[in-house]
Amino acid sequence: MSLNLRDDFPFFKNSDIAYLDSAATTQKPYSVIKEIEDYYTKYNANAGRGSHELSMLSKQLISDTRKKIKEFVGASSDEEVIFTKNTTEAINLIAYSYALNNLKENDEILLGISNHHSNIVPWQFVSSKTGAKIKYIYLDENGQLDINDFKSKLSNKTKLVSISAVVNTTGVIQPFYEIIKLSHLVNAITLIDTAQSILHFKHEFSKWDMDIITFSGHKMYASLGIGVLVAKRKLLENIPPFIYGGDMIEYVEEESSTFKDLPERFEAGTLDTSAILSLNKAIDYINDVSYDKIREIEYNLSSLLIDKLKKLDFIELYCVDVVDRVGIVSFNVKGVHSHDTAFILDQYKVAIRSGHHCTQPLMKYLGIASSCRVSISIYNNIEDIDRLILALYKVKEVFYG
Amino acid sequence: MDNINKLYQQTIMDYAKRNDVKGEIENPNYALRGHNPSCGDDITLLIKLENDKIVDMKYIGSSCAISSASTSMLIENVIGKNKDEVQNILNSFFSMMRSEEYDETILNDASVLEFVKDMPARIKCATLSWHSLKSIIGEGNDGIREIKGNN
């Protein structure tokens, strides 16, 4: 770990971009990149497919990472940790294996209106197949899920409550702890999509009595292609596999097969060992830096950014007055479509996200068609913020003259 | 900053701000929504087609300067034209965007947008409503309908 954390990320040695799109995907520290190179130059083999030493080693490295993730999220056993391709696949696993088999007509699924599409569309599919109804939890004036609205919709019919811990569009931390507690009073299970929260504060899966969480490695300094589902053991034990294939079976006869126990039952096919190892190193890196430091840097920079944006009369900000937030700021240049703003910023080498951020129902609810989103990570600095502000003046110049 | 100056030149900005082609029209017999999910452009074309001729047309929705300007140019070009003429205009525009030969004379100011063909981030903005109109004129469907994900 370098004194200046930005030095840990080789990307910034090769690029002069002010990278402010870390909520889409983070840049990667040297230790993560080095691990992938090491794996392919020294250890590459198909995990657990042969009796030779290298194959066993890969298998062992995957098990070690599983254990590390268990500790990282505070789960109760390694078997609760399932590797997937990404968050979307993890949510789909629950939708297909759990929801399709357990939900029926007149059951209800409660979703946050601020959910990412990946946490809405699978449930619409479940609803169309099972007849279960979807109800949405709306937001209060700050952009947090309205607990009273939630309470009014929660009932004995509610079987599943699925929300995101942090809204990817606004950075608002949702009151997921309270939602879990209330859901359990009616025996509903909860899925908390932690894709946007996992990098920003410590999660305590078992202590908080969470049922299911999902996240992606690439949003937390690891490589693309690796995601994680953590689910309570008793929930996973009672549902069938999601994807069928090799390395998840005990005996295969001509007509039928028996399946392995957790967690392999849910991990058909060859896993991406290098991506799993990159996640292993990313967790080490996060632990080295510490959540306290990450929060501090993100809080300081995003507060500074919000202060500066509030002074610009041509900027409209969304949901920034909530105390519980991560380093995401959503805004528009008044009267200018977000795509125009992002394009002009890009010409000045400032990379942000524009559009609806895969949250169309939220956008509709906020009454805007799209927004610009800045997301901050530990490698950003005041210069990045200043360059953004300067480029926003250029947007103003182009559109207002 | 060449791209900014080109993209947001006066002609394009003037077309983007044109209010006379924006809003509702009386008794449209076609309404087609074109949506570019990745950037958030969302344009609905309202068209009144009589005897195979576009007699009135406007657009509503939320769109960036480039797709707004491009839609204004499209509307200006096709009002008063019959289906065959409109088809030629559309084909000419798409040829231009594919760097093929095209008839500049029937595109009028829309030919200003030629340089956008080399801007991968913006080409969808420039062609969005042209694709929408093509799907109406090309298929010859009657009645009002809505499509999504037109990109």
Image: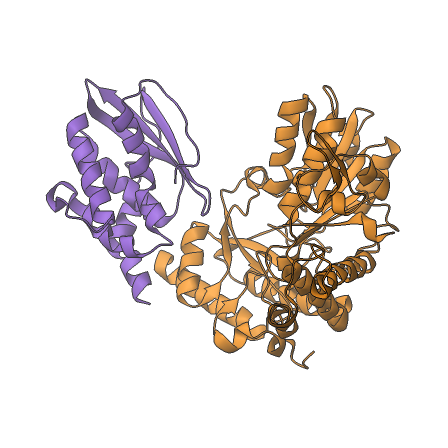
Chain colours: A orange, B purple
Residue A158: percent from the left, percent from the top? 78, 28
Residue A61: percent from the left, percent from the top? 74, 63
Q: Nearer the viewer, residue A326 or A190?
A: A190
A222 above or below A254? below
Counting every numbered tag in the picture gives 0
Residue B144: percent from the left, percent from the top? 37, 21
User: Residue at position x 64%, y 68% from top?
Assistant: A39
Q: Nearer the viewer, residue A252 or B17?
A: A252
Q: Nearer the viewer, residue A33 or A252?
A: A252
* Furthest residue toward bottom: A3
B100 above or below A101? below
Asked if residue A174 can be seen in this view, the reply is no
Quadrant of the drawing holding the N terminus of chain A: bottom right
User: Residue at position x 24%, y 22% from top?
Assistant: B49
Residue A358: percent from the left, percent from the top? 55, 44
Q: Nearer the viewer, residue B12 or B148?
A: B148
Quadrant of the drawing holding the C terminus of chain A: bottom left
Asked if residue A262 can be seen in this view, the reply is yes
B31 above or below B109? above
Residue A8 falls in image quadrant: bottom right
Q: Is residue A400 left or right of residue B93?
A: right
